[in-house]
Image (cartoon, grey):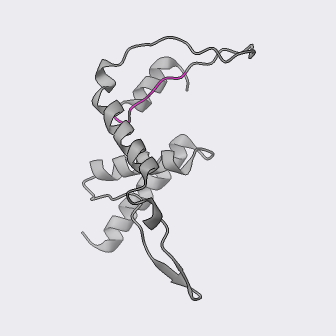
Amino acid sequence: MTENDIADRIMDAAFQLHRELGPGLLESVYEVILSRQLTEMGLAVERQVPIPVNFWGVLETKGEHLKGNDDTEYKRKMFELLTAHVDTAIRAGELDLGESAKQMSFTMLMEKSWQQEILTAGVI
């Protein structure tokens, strides 16, 4: 497979994702879903890899500061924990939001089944 073939697959997957979800979600949502799609297509995917960029004499190493960061590690471990137990999750109750008259509910959806769960719930 050539670099152009890989780029075509990535662009096709990104456009399909944008057509189905539309604009307005957090970048991280698109990132997670796109990386999953590309992995399922057999492409090797790494997310949030630090890349040093030198532009007009300014060296930016975005992402380097997150390596080993306590918050980043906590989120990674929490995600691993939730993923490991998603199949045994149960409804735990409701959260009182104080004086708000509106009731809100939240459901954790996993990557492997989010589309079906949204359709089943009648959200779209």
Q: Which of 114 and 93 is in front in this view?
A: 93
Q: Is the magenta stretch mostly helix, strand or loop?
A: loop
Q: In the figure, residue 91 lies in which quadrant?
A: top left
Identity of the residue drawn at 58% across and 15% down: 95
Q: Where is residue 52 in the image (x, y as percent from the top left)?
A: 45, 76
Left or right of 31, for residue 26: right
Q: Residue 10, percent across and down?
A: 39, 60
- x and y, in percent, of residue 51 in the image: 42, 72
Residue segment shown in magenta:
106-112
Q: In which quarter of the image is residue 7?
A: bottom left
Note whether 3 is above or below 27 in the view shown: below
Quarter of the picture holding the N terminus: bottom left
* Depth check, front residue: 64 or 24: 64
Q: Quadrant of the C terminus?
A: top right
- Seen as rendered, the residue at the extreme front is 70
The relative height of residue 76 versus residue 43 in the rendered view (above or below) is above
Residue at 62% of width from left, 18% of height from top? 104
Q: Is residue 111 magenta?
A: yes
Count the marks: 0
